[in-house]
Amino acid sequence: MISLTRFHTHERIAINPDLIERIEETPDTVITLTNGAKYLVEESIDQIVDIMEVHRARVLAIARHLAADERAVPSSGRLRLLRGHVVDDVELEGDRAPEAEP
């Protein structure tokens, strides 16, 4: 989640950046989510893009940290970082998923 400021009320809100469909400056900044919800915020498009970049970098850093911890600790069923097209130690051909076992 990224933290932004509602226009006029200065209320802090958290928005899932994966659900942002578009951001417009009309001249106020309007964020439209994939479900059609709209939010009027104080931050500019450039500020929101910067916030989203930091958020995604933080997510990747946490994923790498968890992956490093998993290598040091026996499997505990936690999430792990996948590289390339490998799922459950099975290398995929192209973009196809492995066949389900009967």
Image (cartoon, rainbow, N blue to C red):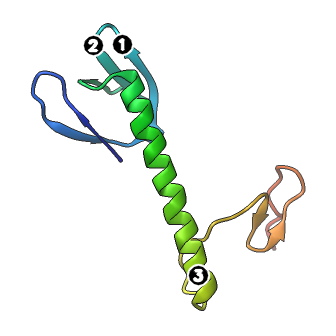
- The picture quadrant where one finds residue 13 is top left
Residue 96 position, x and y percent, is: 83, 53
- Numbered label attached to residue 25: 1
Q: Please tell me whether mark 1 sits on a helix, a strand or a loop.
A: strand
Horizontal side, residue 97 vs residue 77: left or right: right
Residue 50 position, x and y percent, is: 43, 35
- The picture quadrant where one finds residue 52 is top left
Q: Which comes sooner in the sequence, label 1 or label 3?
A: 1
Placement of 82 over or under 78, stated as above or below: above
Placement of 86 over or under 88, stated as above or below: above
Q: Please tell me whether mark 3 sits on a helix, a strand or a loop.
A: helix
* Residue furthest out toward the left: 9
* Residue furthest out toward the bottom: 74
Q: Is residue 35 visible?
A: no
Instruction: Compare residues 92 and 68 and report the one nearer the observer.
Output: 68
The residue depicted at 18 percent of the width and 23 percent of the height is 7
Horizontal side, residue 87 vs residue 93: left or right: left
Q: Please tell me whether mark 2 sits on a helix, a strand or a loop.
A: loop
- Label 1 and label 2: CA atoms lie apart by 5 Å
Q: Are marks 1 and 3 in contact (CB under 8 Å)?
A: no
Residue 100 position, x and y percent, is: 79, 67
- The picture quadrant where one finds residue 43 is top left
Quadrant assignment for the C terminus: bottom right
Q: Badge 2: how crowded within 10 Å, few (<14), some, or many (20+)?
A: some
The amino acid type, in three-letter code, at marker 1 is Glu
Q: Badge 1: how crowded within 10 Å, few (<14), some, or many (20+)?
A: few
Residue occupied by mark 3 = 70
- Label 1 and label 3: CA atoms lie apart by 43 Å
The amino acid type, in three-letter code, at marker 3 is Glu
The amino acid type, in three-letter code, at marker 2 is Asp
Q: Are marks 1 and 2 in contact (CB under 8 Å)?
A: yes
Residue occupied by mark 2 = 28
